[in-house]
Image (tube, rainbow, N blue to C red):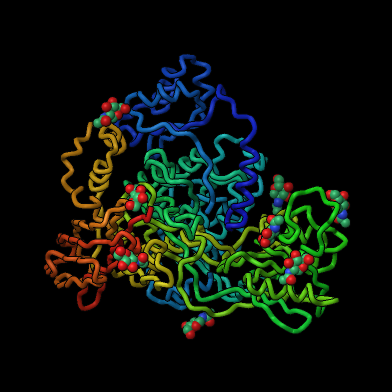
Amino acid sequence: MFQTVLQLLLLILLLETTMMHGSNAHERKAYIVYMGELPAAETSVMDVHHNLLLTAIGDEKVARESIIHSYRKSFNGFAARLLPHEVKRISDEEGVVSVFPNTLLKLHTTRSWDFLGMPNTFKGRNFAVESNIIVGLLDTGIWVGAPSFSDKDSGPVPAKWKGKCVTGGNFTGCNRKVIGARYFNLEGQDPGTKNPSPSDDDGHGTHTSSTLAGIHVEGASLYDIAKGTARGGVPSVRIAMYKVCWTMGCSDMDLLAGFDNAIADGVDLISVSIGGQPRNFFEDSIAIGAFHAMKKGILTSCSAGNDGPYTSTVQNIAPWILTVAASGIDRQFMTVATLGTGKKFSGIAINTFSPKRKMYPLTSGALAANTSAETYGNASACDYGTLSKDKVNGKIVFCMGNYGQDYTIQDLGGAGAIMALDERTDIAFTTLVPGTCVIPGDGKRIEHYINSTRNPLAAIEKTKTYNISAPFVASFSSRGPPSIPLNILKPDIAAPGLDILAAFSKLATITGDPGDKRHALFNIISGTSMACPHAAAAAAYVKSFHPDWSPAAIKSALMTTATPMKIKDVDAELGSGSGQINPIKAAHPGLVYDISISSYIGFLCKQGYNSTAIGIIAGGHKKYDCSKFQSATGTDGLNYPTLHIQLKTNTSRILATFHRTVTNVGYGKSVYKAKVTSPRSLSVRVFPETLKFNSLHQKLSFKVVVKGSLERNETELISALLEWKDIKHSVKSHILVYRPLE
Ligand SMILES: *[C@@H]1O[C@H](CO)[C@@H](O)[C@H](O)[C@H]1NC(C)=O
Ligand SMILES: *[C@@H]1O[C@H](CO)[C@@H](O)[C@H](O)[C@H]1NC(C)=O
Ligand SMILES: *[C@@H]1O[C@H](CO)[C@@H](O)[C@H](O)[C@H]1NC(C)=O
Ligand SMILES: *[C@@H]1O[C@H](CO)[C@@H](O)[C@H](O)[C@H]1NC(C)=O
Ligand SMILES: *[C@@H]1O[C@H](CO)[C@@H](O)[C@H](O)[C@H]1NC(C)=O
Ligand SMILES: *[C@@H]1O[C@H](CO)[C@@H](O)[C@H](O)[C@H]1NC(C)=O
Ligand SMILES: *[C@@H]1O[C@H](CO)[C@@H](O)[C@H](O)[C@H]1NC(C)=O
Ligand SMILES: *[C@@H]1O[C@H](CO)[C@@H](O)[C@H](O)[C@H]1NC(C)=O
């Protein structure tokens, strides 16, 4: 489905063609009516929903038929099919926070854990506590038959678990590892869904679940590539799968049903590798779900999106979410193409095929063009329909341009594809036929060889792994700053998301292409989707040491102990927030920046959200007087672990004040001193510069004043670092000033 950037592009094409048909102004469309916290009194929420609909629609029968689903376990709201004037009427009703259209969101080992300093043999675990932790994933389902989900070492299911295991279709049941599985397909309109069940016919949900909590499986590989022991970050943790994604995508109403149930079922953490364009927080299903999860002490980890390297593309930006960017680890997959002359070119791709012959005839798209073809495509780029089957059959074909031509070459019976990219890449896609992707300069050299040789030959070797320097922000990972003008830096953190080996579903092919015959127990895929469960696992690890910590405290621990990303490019903080997760350090952060629910409410007030709506969200339906929330002061109004300033275009003066409070979670008596690292153009002053704690859990406050000025034509990014240091800990807060150029 959408786990790779390539498949995403194909999907967008598909969606756009589908959406051109059948929109009618008088057709009922699906909306979510969000009504905040559940009422305290034992009122029948479903009657309330029906009465609201009846008032707006006026007809008892139509009102009954229009409702799709009531949310009533963890928050209040419903999904219904409505006409525009009914939407307007319902929006004006008391108790309604927002009414928004149901949209489709997208889905956005194990060496990565060794790379993060949690080797296989790591002893410092709290296994007993860890095995009592349940993580809920909202995803494409799960294939419980994967060796990573064997329950041979799992004890009894935690007593607190209240969830269900729904069987049917290809899904035969759960075990003591995968303790819950449900699916939500509320509209039931997905064309690819004949027999809905929690089973994973895509592979994405199996991959994310095993990255998070898969057990150790020796000898894991994709066709012997990346061979080693596969395992999740927290192998004792239990998995609960909420299938909310289908062939068309993941709809808001299904996502909300996933959250509604997961929270009520008793999960401890939620991982969501799905996203869409940022919206007002209370018209955004993931922000709403994560908010109610946070109120129940559950942290939600979300992927930051795959729209990088462009700035302002980050998704899932609500401050109560842990927003995770993707980084690369120290392993790269290289596939070598050898020409008849013996010259070798290294490309980036995953080729599971070993050549059967020493050499194959080689041609190019330009030379293999079908001159009588009736399409407008570009033969040099091997566009579909432009090549002659006769000239491609049995040959390796060189294609200019971009990914995806392996599909065309397979279709025409070609022996392989050498693709020349427009730009250098870091992401390795698995090819359908023997294939590799070379850089543009090498592409020119290969094409010159083809043009100047009578019988050009080539062979494509099977993929090998190479050691590279890491971490770095993956090119596709969405960058900040958040587009809703907030002085909250997003993404929060980075975790491995490039070329990740993890368990896969037997029901899917390794490329997701129906023409592909390859099924594997493990697969290598990329995306912030893969980064999100790494961060969720790190959060579960921290929680196993500190079961009583709030979501904000766990998030703070992960952020302030992260390893700052190497500044390969100027956007290290815009791309990775606080840096790469370091779970071992995060278990002992020294100090945490905690955030209470009332602080979030104060923040929402400061953001200009309607006080009536805030009252409904907070619960109790009382009108909130925003002026009462003194805590929301300073530039950002939230006790966030990073400090971020977004300037307006053409402004040059930087002046910001941040109020912060840290809680001592290290030693009882301790003294922390502030250390600031900043460029000369930025003055960062901390008041006071020393924090003296007398006891554990003591809170102390301080203020940070950031001043400076930017030249008109100067770079739009300035970063600095504030560290609180005692004898053992270094509590890092990144400071980032950003000004868009135009
Ligand atoms: C999954 O279910 C479908 C329809 O029920 C069936 O055709 C298919 O064979 C099943 N696949 C597997 C691998 O069991
Ligand atoms: C060339 O294109 C034409 C028109 O699309 C098609 O009928 C024909 O089969 C193609 N020839 C080859 C050799 O692929
Ligand atoms: C065909 O694609 C190649 C490679 O991307 C490009 O250089 C060329 O300009 C394209 N030709 C046309 C006619 O678009
Ligand atoms: C190779 O030949 C093709 C087709 O004649 C032409 O379009 C292309 O520019 C040539 N490339 C090189 C590098 O000589
Ligand atoms: C890559 O090299 C580094 C430094 O030499 C080493 O620590 C690491 O284990 C190597 N990684 C692999 C995959 O061999
Ligand atoms: C908040 O929304 C309610 C209902 O839509 C409206 O009546 C009220 O005037 C709004 N309050 C503010 C402060 O804008
Ligand atoms: C910023 O300044 C430039 C040059 O003075 C001007 O052309 C541009 O319109 C200004 N942009 C904004 C958003 O004010
Ligand atoms: C920026 O402006 C200053 C003053 O006008 C000038 O001296 C400097 O060369 C400019 N820098 C760049 C990178 O254009």
Left or right: 400 with respect to 681? right
Left or right: 506 with respect to 526? right
Q: Is 481 in front, or is 545?
A: 481
Residue furthest to the bottom in view is 342
Q: Is 714 in front, or is 309?
A: 714
Residue 432 at x, y = what percent? 72, 62
Residue furthest to the right in view is 390
Residue 121, visible in the rendered structure: yes
Q: Is 602 in front, or is 52?
A: 602
Picture layout, residue 586 above or below residue 655:
below
Residue 158, visible in the rendered structure: no
Residue 396 at x, y = what percent? 78, 69
Q: Residue at x 41, y 20 (%)?
A: 51
Q: Is 544 in front, or is 470?
A: 470
Q: Find residue 421 and report its image quarter.
A: bottom right
Q: Residue at x 45, y 21 (%)?
A: 85
Left or right: 546 with respect to 300? left
Picture layout, residue 268 above or below residue 247:
below
Q: Residue at x 46, y 78 (%)?
A: 121
Residue 631 at x, y = what percent? 18, 48
Q: Residue at x 31, y 59 (%)?
A: 712
Residue 687 at x, y = what percent? 13, 64
Picture layout, residue 157 above or below residue 82:
below
